[in-house]
Amino acid sequence: MSKFDLVIFDCDGVLVDSEALSTKVWVQFLADHGLPYGTEDIAAHAGLTDRALRNLISEETGYELPDDTPQQIEERATSLFDNELNALPGVLDAVSRLTLPKCVCSNSGMARLHRSLRTVGLFDHFGPDRIYHASLVGKPKPAPDLHLHALERMGATAEHAVVIEDSVTGVTAARAAGITVFGYTAASHLGEDQADKLRAAGASLVFNDMNELDRLLNVA
């Protein structure tokens, strides 16, 4: 029997293979502004909100990106996601089999988050009441606010919850909330050293096959 009574999934890079698409949008957007960022440069900041990434790049370059950058990124991403977004391998089956209470915690905005989950057929496995997005709290990941909000709404405790995260940003947030974290490395945007990065950030274990989730929840 599992010691956990709640499984919290990140969305981008855990449920859906979206980070590579988001990175593509960001690289083109920055190129349009004369900023030569590569895919690895953007992927290194996976897990941040579009607002946080906009602020970070403006600070790094001294070039003030438009204040509506998040809205522009959202508009560019919509058609790309609609046409190319897929669930990660094994996710649909793993989520369908899961008998423990589950929810989603994502730094994505509500519209993109709901649209992504609907596109790949996962929305009904959670429903709007168990999908939590960054705008619901004061500070997005890597702050613990979003995970703590989920615990409160789901009636769970940090000691008996587990978070599935693909990014250092997400692992940092979950550990700050006192929650066990499983690192997940199947997304197409991740480098070979991602497992080491997730462990260093505090993941208790790292896996790359969602079909292993049932077993891991019972042995961790």
Image (cartoon, rainbow, N blue to C red):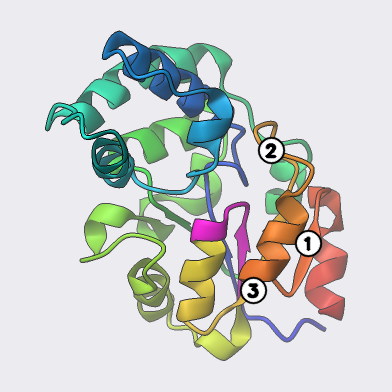
The label number, if any, that marks residue 206 in the structure image: 1
In the rendered structure, which amino acid carries the disc numbered 2?
Ala
Task: Name the residue: 43% across, 20% down.
Answer: 27
Vertical arrangement, residue 53 with respect to residue 96, above or below = above
For badge 1, the amino acid type reads Val
Label for residue 202?
A: 3
Callout 3 environment at 10 Å: few (<14), some (14 to 19), or many (20+)?
Answer: some
Q: Would residue 167 be counted in the magenta stretch?
A: yes
Relative image position of residue 34 (x, y in whole percent)? 30, 13
Contact, mark 3 vs mark 2 (Cβ under 8 Å): no
First reached walking from the N terminus: tag 3 or tag 2: 2
Question: Measured along the vertical axis of the image, is residue 210 above or below residue 82?
Answer: below
- Tell me: 68 left or right of 135: left
Closest to the observer, 45 or 145: 45
Write the start and end of the magenta stretch as one range.
162-169
Q: CA distance from mark 1 to mark 3?
A: 10 Å
* Residue at figure coordinates x 51%, y 60% from the top left: 170
Q: Earlier in the sequence, mark 2 or mark 1?
A: 2
- How far across and down, in percent of the image, does residue 92 sit? 70, 41
Q: Quadrant of residue 15?
A: top right
Residue that label 2 marks: 187
Q: Dot 2 surroundings within 10 Å: few (below 14), some, or many (20 or more)?
A: many
Neighbor class of circle 1 (other Cα within 10 Å; few <14, some 14-19, many 20+) is some
Q: Position of residue 72 (x, y in %)?
A: 23, 21
Task: Report if residue 159 is visible in the image.
Answer: yes
Taking depth in this image into account, of 62 and 136 the one nearest to the observer is 62
